[in-house]
Structure formats: C-alpha cells, structure tokens
Image (spheres, rainbow, N blue to C red):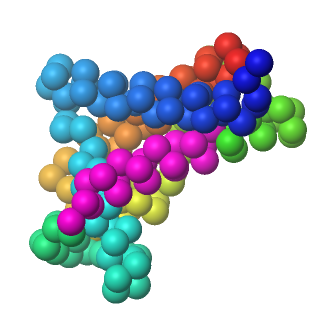
Amino acid sequence: MLTSTVYLIIISFLSVAVIDLWQRIAHRLGGSAPTDWGIIGRWLLMIFSHRIIVNTQLQETDAYPNERTIGWIFHYLVGGAYVIVYFILWKICGLISTTIWDGFVFGAISVLVPWFFFMPAIGAGILARKTPNPTFVCISAFITHSIFGVSIALLLKAM
C-alpha cells in the first residue's frame, strides 16, 4: 500500500502534467505559447547569482546553462507545494473538499501568485501589464490555474 506522501508526489506530478498538456492544447488551438520555463530558470539563477528578485530586463539577459531544466524542476516543485496546500486545507483544516467547485476556486485563487508575484518578478508587470496583450495573458493564466485546481481536487478524490 502506498503512503500519503507517495500519493501526494504522484498527484503533484500528474496535476502539473495536466496543465502542461492543457497549455500545449491551447497553443495548438490558437492560444498563447506555453510557458517558457527557461525564463523561470533564468530568473531563479539570477536570484542566486545577483540577488535580483524583480528583474525587468530578464528577457535581454544572457541565457544560463541548464536554465530550462531548472525552470521545469521549479515548475513541478511549485506545483507540488500547491498540492500540499490543497491537501492541508482539505484533510487538516477541513476548509475545502475534493469537488470540482472547490478545485476551481482553489485554482482561481492560486492565480494571484503569478499575477502579482511571478509576472512582475520576470519583468511582465503586475497583471502582465507590460506584455503586448495583458488581458489575454491574465485570462490564460486564470484558465490554466483553474484547470490545475480542478485536477488537484479530482486526483486527491481518487487517492
């Protein structure tokens, strides 16, 4: 029998894989390109090498070796952190359940992190206002995070 920890690791991997798949499908259907995890890796490496958290020039900064791999690993670790938060809110606090609605709400709330932290940190501005189409970027992030929240809920329900 698998332990809760192993289940949470599997659920983390699967729920993040769901949003990665969603981004590729959305891109094929005419949406924006999937997230460039190399930029996120570059952002992390800039934090460690230059102690710069908000980097408005990140796109113009030279690439680091292995930045894409580092970005992908970070992406899955952050996804795992969201799964742990959901699990705690569900099993320990009893604040949410594993319904589609609660998953949607959790995902919808979780989009506040990229809107108000990650987008500004990588130079895209709050609510992606420094991108060519901020509304589209924000709606895409909202949909992606909502799908992520629903996938977490449904996978935890199956646990």
Q: Position of residue 29 (x, y in %)?
A: 17, 20
Q: Residue furthest front?
A: 1
Drawn side of residue 47 relative to residue 136, left or right? right
123 magenta-colored: no
Which residue is depicted at the point 87% across and 38% down?
92
68 magenta-colored: yes
Vertical comparison of 94 with 22: above or below: below
Vertical comparison of 108 with 49: above or below: above
Q: Residue furthest top?
A: 158
The quadrant holding residue 121 is bottom left
Q: Quadrant of the C terminus?
A: top right
Q: Position of residue 5 (x, y in %)?
A: 72, 36
Which residue is depicted at the point 57% across and 42% down?
80
Q: Position of residue 77 (x, y in %)?
A: 51, 49
Q: Position of residue 91 (x, y in %)?
A: 83, 32
Which residue is depicted at the point 33% across and 36% down?
140
The quadrant holding residue 109 is top right
Task: Confirm whether residue 119 shows in the render.
Answer: yes
Vertical comparison of 53 with 9: above or below: below
Viewer-nearest residue: 24 or 97 = 24
Which residue is depicted at the point 21% across and 65% down?
65
**What span is in magenta?**
65-83
Viewer-nearest residue: 105 or 43 = 43
Viewer-nearest residue: 33 or 142 = 33
Magenta stretch, overall SS: helix
The quadrant holding residue 90 is top right
Q: How many marks?
A: 0
